[in-house]
């Protein structure tokens, strides 16, 4: 049993389709209703009449039809001698009605079945059949399996778009612009984008004195608008997602268009057929019917004169029906003409784009376009409201509002931390954008943005007076012109990292006070003659450049346009760096890092860098370092890092590097140490961990300035007493070796703050550790079982000192 609630839902579902019915569809609906009334009225009249035909016997036949004798007499003819009469009639003639009632009923029934024309007999049923066909054609596309679900989905989305507060807000902004209300317009406001290809080149040429790829046209800030609450914002966000999925599903097909076109063609064909035969058969509906049947055995008469009682009213109804069909057919012809003359498989929002600030509303095609054309016939406002949810600009505005509602100032302040450099940093990860409340955190020094698809830095960034460092990881950053002016004066460190190889954004080259630039995954021209060569010359204050990419040579853009660079770090990610000759041009270089460059020997071009202080050749393919003697020509070299290579031995010539202060040789294949190494008396940092050393020479005592000594993960069985003569030693790493005991002389290292002994074969710890007054428990890396071998006073002192190293 169908309930009232189900009936109401069904009625609401049917009424919701009125958006997709243009005026001719509504006109068809009303004509169909009138046709249905005509059919019902004609059928009711026919069914309620007890005697549709009223027949009387014909007593006089003349010329094969029933004659009226008194008409012959009135004409002066002799009826008795008139040819064709069966028998002479007496004068004057008297007509008698001498049949029984049942005989009349019999005659009426027989004449109705045999003599009455089929059109007059079935007229109500023909009208009803035509009406049902017309109605079915009008609603077929709404219930066809391949179209009904799409139409229902579209209507539901359209209603939500129409009722959404976000739609009202967006259109209000447009009306405000058209009415001339003042808007906040930034003078010479230009957006500089990291994407390079998504901007308007013409606008950029007008904004700056030279071509700037990646510039966007001036932005417009909308007037103060109402703030959506969280629930309304989430609803609007859901509508955006539904519109995207619906467009993806529908725009590639034209099923709805074809079904609608076919049903109109069927209507036109049906109209032609009805007009072809209904007016012709209309003349067969007559009042008088001459009925000749052979029933003389029952009634005594062969011919009867009958009257069709519904003839006149059926003629009127049929004529009225023909008029309705003509109106229906003309309307169908017009709709067919509308579909064939117009390009209904494309829908353009050009007019709306010109009148609003949503200039990115895309044109649609196929079924999507056709449905919008139908909606326009009902009310163009529906398409206008729907288009708001096709605009990425509109979606970005909504995302920004939702983002601001979610990320309050209090929540952002809770994310502020101090990084390893003791700077106040805010790290935002995987957001939809940059919350406006970020610019209220004036104490922030470092802003880190990671995996944020689109970020815009507006003029409000100037409120971050302490901002000096910006990190952009796997994000697309757009910088406002006024914001760029602020960054140009204040930004000192910039880190950019791309998931895939991409061009350096143009706004980077405007940061004239930038001192450190870290680029990962950026495309740098290795040969001169490209546009990006011109940008680097403006970075006159740049002192540090870090490149992480896969290059075959050091880009000339670095060596030619950045001669004052003091630190260059190149992480080639394992790709072979072939050409290094142009390094000679960088005479001011103080620090050079060539990481993962697949170098087999130390490049000779390095020996021309007279001002070089630090050299790092980590993760290369060095097997021998015979060229180390040439480092004596670099009087300023104080730090040499050759770790994570395949070096088998250290040449004796290393003793010539008298100015060396830091030497890192960890993660190699070194088995022994040359005595000449200990001639480098200025060494205060020596890392020999993860090698194959079996002993340490006694001459290590000559390294009087040694503060850091690491031999972790070797095969050392005994420590020389000379090691404990290095009184400045602060960090001693001896873990994962083969030591069986620790000399009591360790107590003489009064400056020792960090001691690692874990992974050896020690049975006890010397009580002389009490002499290491700077050593804390947290910095004594040893097995817990060995702590019990210390005297209680030593253990208590270590336990009470829980400071971190």
Image (spheres, rainbow, N blue to C red):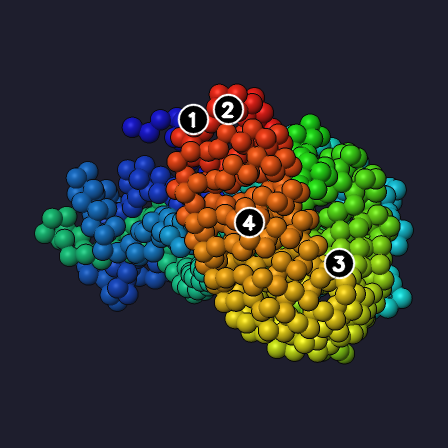
Residue at image location 51% in from the left, 58% down from the top: 667
State the SS at label 2.
Answer: helix
x, y percent for residue 563: 81, 69
State the SS at label 3.
Answer: strand
Q: Looking at the image, is mark 3 or mark 1 earlier in the sequence? A: 3
Q: CA distance from mark 3 to mark 1?
A: 50 Å
Residue at image location 41% in from the left, 39% down from the top: 762
Q: Are marks 1 and 2 in contact (CB under 8 Å)?
A: yes
x, y percent for residue 320: 49, 50
Q: Is residue 199 shown to the viewer in this render?
A: no
For disc 2, the marked residue is: 795
For disc 1, the marked residue is: 788
Residue 559 is tagged as: none
Q: Quadrant of residue 751?
A: top right
For disc 4, the marked residue is: 710
For disc 3, the marked residue is: 544
């Amino acid at each position: 049993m169908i309930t009232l609630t189900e009936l109401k839902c069904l009625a609401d579902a049917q009424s919701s389709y009125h958006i997709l019915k243009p005026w001719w569809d509504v006109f068809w609906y009303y004509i169909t209703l009138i046709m249905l009334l005509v059919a019902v009225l004609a059928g009711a009249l026919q069914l309620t009449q007890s005697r549709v035909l009223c027949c009387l016997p014909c007593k006089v036949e003349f010329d094969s039809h029933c004659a009226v004798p008194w008409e012959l007499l009135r004409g002066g003819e002799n009826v008795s001698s008139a040819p064709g009469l069966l028998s002479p009639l007496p004068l004057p003639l008297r007509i008698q009605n001498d049949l029984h009632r049942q005989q009349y009923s019999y005659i009426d029934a027989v004449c109705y079945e045999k003599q009455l024309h089929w059109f007059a007999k079935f007229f109500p049923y023909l009208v009803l059949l035509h009406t049902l066909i017309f109605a079915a054609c009008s609603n077929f596309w709404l219930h066809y399996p391949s179209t009904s679900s799409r139409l229902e989905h579209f209507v539901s989305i359209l209603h939500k778009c129409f009722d959404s507060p976000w739609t009202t807000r967006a259109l209000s902004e447009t009306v405000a612009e058209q009415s001339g209300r003042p808007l906040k317009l930034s003078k010479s406001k230009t957006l500089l984008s990291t994407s390079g290809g998504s901007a308007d080149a013409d606008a950029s040429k007008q904004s700056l004195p030279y071509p700037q790829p990646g510039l966007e046209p001036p932005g417009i800030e909308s007037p103060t608008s109402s703030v959506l609450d969280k629930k309304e914002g989430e609803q609007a966000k859901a509508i955006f997602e539904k519109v995207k999925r619906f467009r993806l599903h529908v725009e590639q097909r034209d099923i709805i268009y074809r079904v609608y076109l076919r049903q109109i063609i069927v209507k036109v064909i049906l109209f032609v057929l009805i007009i072809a035969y209904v007016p012709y058969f209309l003349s067969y509906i007559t009042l008088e019917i001459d009925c000749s049947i052979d029933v003389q055995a029952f009634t005594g008469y062969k011919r009867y004169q009958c009257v069709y009682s519904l003839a006149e009213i059926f003629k009127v109804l049929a004529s009225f029906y023909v008029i309705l069909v003509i109106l229906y057919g003309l309307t169908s012809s017009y709709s067919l003409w509308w579909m064939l003359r117009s390009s209904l498989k494309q829908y353009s929002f050009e007019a709306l784009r010109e009148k609003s600030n949503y200039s990115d509303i895309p044109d649609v095609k196929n079924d999507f376009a056709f449905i919008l054309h139908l909606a326009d016939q009902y009310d163009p406002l529906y398409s206008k409201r729907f288009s708001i949810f096709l605009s990425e600009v509109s979606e970005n505005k909504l995302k920004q509002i939702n983002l601001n509602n979610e990320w309050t100032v209090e929540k952002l302040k809770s994310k502020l931390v101090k990084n390893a450099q003791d700077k106040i940093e805010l790290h935002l990860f995987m957001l939809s954008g940059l919350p406006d409340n970020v610019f209220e955190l004036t104490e922030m020094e470092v802003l880190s943005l990671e995996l944020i698809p689109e970020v815009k830095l507006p003029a409000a960034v100037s409120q971050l007076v302490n901002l000096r460092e910006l990190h952009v990881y796997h994000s697309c950053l757009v910088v406002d012109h006024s914001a760029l002016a602020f960054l140009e004066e204040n930004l000192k460190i910039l880190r950019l990292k791309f998931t895939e190889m991409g061009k350096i954004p143009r706004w980077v080259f405007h940061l004239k006070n930038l001192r450190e630039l870290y680029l990962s995954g950026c495309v740098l021209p290795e040969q001169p003659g490209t546009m990006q060569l011109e940008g680097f010359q403006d970075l006159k204050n740049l002192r540090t450049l870090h490149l992480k990419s896969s290059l075959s040579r050091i880009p000339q853009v670095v060596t030619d346009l950045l001669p004052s660079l003091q630190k260059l770090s190149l992480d080639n990610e394992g790709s072979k760096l072939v050409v290094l000759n142009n390094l000679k041009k960088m005479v001011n270089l103080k620090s050079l890092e060539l990481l993962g460059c697949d170098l087999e020997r130390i490049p000779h071009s390095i020996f021309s860098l007279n001002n070089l202080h630090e050299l790092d050749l980590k993760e290369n393919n060095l097997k021998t370092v015979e060229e180390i003697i040439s480092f004596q020509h670099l009087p300023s070299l104080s730090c040499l890092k050759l770790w994570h290579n395949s070096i088998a031995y250290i040449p004796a010539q290393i003793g010539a590097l008298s100015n060396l202060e830091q030497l890192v040789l960890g993660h190699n294949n070194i088995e022994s140490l040359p005595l000449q190494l200990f001639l480098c008396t200025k060494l205060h940092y020596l890392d020999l961990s993860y090698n194959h050393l079996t002993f340490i020479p006694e001459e290590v005592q000559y390294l009087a300035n040694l503060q850091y000594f690491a031999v972790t993960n070797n095969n050392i069985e005994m420590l020389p007493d000379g090691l404990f003569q290095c009184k400045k030693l602060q960090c001693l790493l001896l873990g994962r070796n083969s030591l069986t005991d620790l000399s009591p002389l360790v107590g003489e290292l009064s400056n020792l703050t960090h001691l690692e002994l874990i992974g050896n074969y020690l049975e006890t710890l010397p009580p002389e550790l009490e002499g290491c007054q700077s050593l804390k428990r947290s910095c004594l890396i040893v097995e817990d079982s060995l702590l019990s071998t210390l005297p209680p006073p030593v253990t208590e002192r270590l336990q009470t000192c829980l400071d971190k190293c």
